[in-house]
Amino acid sequence: MIKGKENPNEHEFAEKIGVLYSLAYAVRMMPKQGYTPAGYFEYTVYPLEGIWDLRKRVRN
């Protein structure tokens, strides 16, 4: 999960997504390379899902 503020079209967001997907796929493929971490279970790396809140937050 990536949590943040501002514009999701910025370079920083793209970098974070790239790292997140690379890590998820690397862990997913570990058993095929002969290494299975303790507690590992097979899972699917799903496409990116984004939730943006466009409301302006008001502090009291």
Image (cartoon, helix red, strand yellow):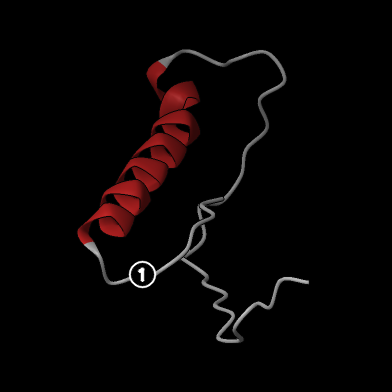
In the image: residue 33, left or right of residue 46: left
Q: Nearer the viewer, residue 22 or 11?
A: 11
Q: Is residue 46 left or right of residue 33?
A: right
Q: Position of residue 51 (x, y in %)?
A: 57, 75
Q: Nearer the viewer, residue 18 or 52?
A: 52
**The disc labelled 1 sits on which kind of residue?**
Pro
* Secondary element at image label 1: loop
Q: Residue furthest front?
A: 60
Residue at x 40% of width, y 69% of height: 6
1 versus 40 height, above or below: below
Q: Give the residue number, with chain letter if any, for mark 1.
A: 8
Q: Residue at x 46, y 65 (%)?
A: 47
Q: Position of residue 53 (x, y in %)?
A: 59, 80
Residue 46, percent across and down? 52, 60
The furthest residue to the left:
11
Q: Is residue 36 left or right of residue 11?
A: right
Q: Outermost residue, right direction? A: 60
At x 28% / y 72%, what residue is drawn?
9
In this view, 15 is above or below 25? below
Picture quarter containing residue 7?
bottom left
The local crowd at label 1, few if under 14, some if 14 to 19, many if 20 or more residues have their Cα within 10 Å, is few
Count the numbered circles shown.
Answer: 1
Quadrant location of the C terminus in the rendered image: bottom right
Q: Nearer the viewer, residue 27 or 18?
A: 18
Residue nearest the observer in this picture, 24 or 32:
24
Where in the figure is residue 48, as x and y percent of width and height? 46, 65
**Vertical placement of residue 4 versus 25, above or below:** below
